[in-house]
Amino acid sequence: MAHPRSTELFGWGRTAPTAADLRRPTSATELRRALPESNPRGLLARGLGRSYGDAAQNSGGRVIETIDVDAFTVHPTPADSDHVLVTAEAGVSIDRLLHSLVPQGLFVPVTPGTRYVTVGGAIAADIHGKNHHRKGSWCDHVESLRLQLADGSVVEIGPTQDPELYWATAGGMGLTGVILDATIRCPRIGSSRVLVDTDRAPDLDSVVELMATGDANYDYSVAWIDLMATGASMGRSVLTRGRFATADELGTAPGSDPFDYRAGVIASAPPFVPGGLLNKLTVRAFNELWFRKAPKERRDELQTIPTFFHPLDMVGGWNRIYGPGGFLQWQFVIPFGTEATLRRIIEELSAAGCTSFLAVLKAFGPSNDSPLSFPAPGWTLALDIPTGVPGLAALLDRLDDMVVEAGGRIYLAKDSRVRAELVPQMYPRLDEWRAVRERVDPQRRINSDLARRLSL
Amino acid sequence: MRDALGAMQSVLVLGGNSEIALAIVDRLIEGRTSRVVLAVREPAGAQSTIDRLTAAGVSASAIAFDALKPENHAKVLNDAFAEGDIDLVISAFGILGSQAEFDADPMFALQAVNANFGGAVTSSLIVADLMRRQGHGTLLMITSIAAMRGRADNYVYGSTKAGQDLFAQGLGDALVGSGVRVVVVRPGFVHTKMTDGMKPAPFSTTPDKVAEVVVDGLAKGRELIFAPSILRFVFAGLIHAPRMIWRRLGG
């Protein structure tokens, strides 16, 4: 029997591939045309495939890769305005935006740890970054967006235009429609350098204390935590915090460009890496070296945007170093006041000896109006784990229960294995979101493997 | 859907009375499996299994499936897949039969060929097509260590399984890139009601131990699983043993 051409797709973790009819439109017109063609298993937009699990997969259906739909405009703005409006098509990456914006003295409102995410993906996952405690998540900075609904019609929505549909689309994992383009508020910056303070914290209590008392003084803050350290040094971390430097603070020769921006890939992971390269021994050694190399306390160090925001982007295809079995990322947030749970989770992870490179710890600020948006006030921890770790499934199930019990949740854009029945507890407004989906797509013409797996 | 750690949410068992398959199901429902469909000749006979699975919180049902009625396979399987995605199909039906029975009744031998090989081919081709359409799925085919080398005391059964095994390997390769995987399981001698009264071969095992190895292999993305695992190494040598020696071992 004949089958339509299909392509296997997986997420950044390279686990659980499924096949779909993959289309790659090259213009907004082609993108709009892609939706009305029907497919019994529906359609889904996909950006750069940086979600870890199956969020950008639609097995047996159609997947529209938007990365060639990538035009954007910087709107003329008075010089005294603290931000500039940028309208970008869904496939524009933060990487492309930065190459254009930074030399003009502009930045993106929010950037995650990689600049290889698209504007469409940033909205669908309502991404966050090191400035969440001050500036919230990506969708707090969107003026409006254009969404193509399952019936083919195009609507313009935003926090003031059909806010119900807007906030269901923000963090809605691409399931309310196909995002065509969005207008985003981009902040001005004083230079392309970040003034960074580094603090080495010997254990979990000290890093929590440092963040709780000091984060308010910084625009950007994140801690890298060594999950392989046990005993007295459990939770030892390197906390880096900063703000953009002004041109005066650069101390460079007059006439040099304060907005100089160069970002590229300086090395690539080989195309095939055998499994087991990352084992307890190599990872422990790496973490030890990394901790010792960090200064105990350093103030006002100038760092470039790639060094401060996107260190992993310097290695192309780094997700391959986990070998053929792939890896997953587990990221949760639990409310402030449940630090005892944070400690217990880190204890369990350290004791399990999960071969995890550094994990990221951050204190979130307030959440927004989106029912499915991940960030909420509290502590968020994200860690990568190779799938081959023995007993991993049971360990993470147990930790999920602790997260739910503390009133927390896990991040859907990172998920590839949570139990479906926990999702309504983690996202208590799930039914509100479902009602909006029912309103705009009663026939589920837009679907994803994540939605199937978690019965969203 | 299959998750990143190899857990499956929905399972269809072809040959739903198979003790090995049910032992695999018992392990899978400790994980993410919440829907089980048992395809059996007499659905009424599977009621006790369904009750047991339902009590464990699983949505379980039985459908009529006869390996020897290949003309019905398409309808039965289409109906099963129409109820929702199936992440894992365990192909576990078959006629064991002793060589003495086959010698005495060649028509019974033909029946074993038609069920074990013929029925596996028709049902698997249909499952492969349905899984291609859903863009994902795993077809687990339980063949046998007997498929690896002809032996005087079980060559009818062994050859039916050899056909199934070779077919499964080729099907797995044909499906690369489709989101669908075929996993071949070769158990050694397994103590079940089917083998009751037979003389156990060396490295004999139990359904539960086979299930343990299979579920572990599924999580690791294996394409060929021996149960017990040591048979992989034992047979790596045995298939090359001189025939005279093999005959003596075969007994």
Image (cartoon, coloured by chain):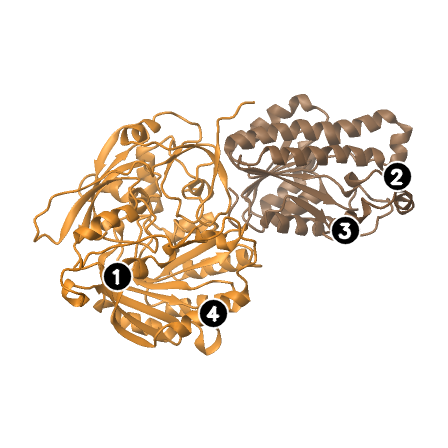
SS under mark 3: loop
Question: Looking at the figure, which quarter contains the C terminus of chain B?
Answer: top right
Q: Colour of chain B?
A: brown
Q: Which residue is mark 4?
A: A347
Q: How packed is label 1: few (under 14 Cα within 10 Å), some, or many (20 or more)?
A: many
Q: Amino acid at mark 1?
A: His
Q: CA distance from mark 1 to mark 3?
A: 58 Å
For the question of whether residue A373 can be seen, the reply is: yes
Circle 4 marks a residue in which chain? A
Q: Quadrant of residue B127?
A: top right
Residue B153 is labelled as 2
Q: Which mark is residue A286?
A: none
Q: Eyeballing the image, is B169 above or below A320?
A: above
Which of the two residues, A248 or A42, is positioned nearer the viewer here?
A248
Chain shown in orange: A
Residue B18: image x %, image y %? 71, 40
Position of residue A217 measured from the top left corner of the image (x, y, whole percent):
21, 69
Q: CA distance from mark 4 to mark 2?
A: 57 Å
Task: Give the SS element for disc 2.
Answer: loop
Residue drawn at 44 percent across, 73 percent down:
A234
Amino acid type, residue under disc 2 in the picture:
Asp
The residue to which callout 3 is attached is: B205
Mark 4–mark 2 CB contact (< 8 Å): no
- Residues tagged by mark 4 and mark 2 found on one chain of the structure: no
Circle on res. A133: 1
Disc 2 versus disc 3: nearer the observer: 2
Indicate left or right for A142 with B46 as reference. left
Depicted A412 relative to depicted A46: above or below: below
